[in-house]
Amino acid sequence: MKILIILAAFLMVMQPANAAGNFVTYQVNGKPYQGYFVTPSRQAPLVLLIHDWDGLTDYEVNRADMLAELGYSVFAADLFGKGIRPTEVKDKRQHTGELYKDRTKMRELLKGALDTAVLQGADRHNAVAMGYCFGGAAVLEYARSGADLKGFVTFHGGLKTPPGQDYQHTKGNLLIFHGSADSNITMEQYAQLAVELEKNNINHEMTNYSGAPHAFTVFGSARYHADADKKSWTRFTQYLRETLKSED
């Protein structure tokens, strides 16, 4: 798989703090994608951020900037294609459904995003992947693929393991945030994942929040649950400090 990087603007000049991010156009298997890269310094640990089912939007950019302010490089990936940001439910289902049916392609897109981050100067050996909703399911797919990252984090993500897959090759630890009022991803699926991870001796931590529905971290939405968002973000940033080497 060839990864061709075409900068959407001038190459970013790294700033010591509060650096502005840039959108980066790249190719995976001949198709253009557009991610977002932001970093406070070249030595900063990397967070690979995967979007939810409406594609890479202002929400993910905002989260990336929040992480950059805390000292992390962030590459917010694009798994749908440049300019593809669905707004209708039927279109969101179409684009996510295509990737759920083609797990090989999903894994190639995740690897392509990580390779792109590395070409921007990020350190693949000091990195975690995290995702929201659909992005959380994609992150677990990447974990099962044996990707050599330090950790995999999901916020209200899909938790089912596809037939024929398991966590035998997972290398990093897993951090799962889930709402117990989530009607899309049930507590039964949550419990099943815990059983699978324990069976495969995967270091994991799973937290569920009472009253929190699906998509509980999405600012301004009807489903936003401030308490669960605050608590999960606090634990996530603590986890990053524990898991990733600082630039010092």
Image (cartoon, rainbow, N blue to C red):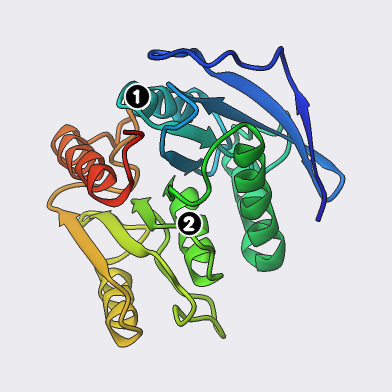
Residue 47 seen by the camera: yes
* Residue holding disc 1: 66
Q: Amino acid at mark 1?
A: Met
Residue beneath label 2, please? Answer: 139
Neighbourhood count class around disc 1 (C-alpha, 10 Å): few under 14, some 14–19, many 20 upward: some
> Could you say which is closer to the camera, residue 123 or residue 239?
123
Residue 155: image x %, image y %? 34, 49
Element marked by disc 1: helix
Residue 67: percent from left, percent from top: 36, 29
In this rendering, the answer to whether 39 lies above or below 131 is above
Lower position in the chain sequence, tag 1 or tag 2: 1
Depth check, front residue: 64 or 11? 11
Q: In percent of the image, x 34 and y 27: which residue is there?
A: 71
**Observer-nearest residue: 22 or 154?**
22
Can residue 132 be seen here? The reply is: no
Q: Nearer the viewer, residue 242 or 218?
A: 242
* Disc sitting over residue 179 in the figure: none
- Residue depicted at 64% across the width and 61% down the height: 107
Rendering quarter of residue 37: top right
Q: Quadrant of residue 201?
A: bottom left
Pick the quarter of the image with the N terminus. bottom right
How far apart in space, not on screen, are marks 1 and 2 (Cα)?
20 Å
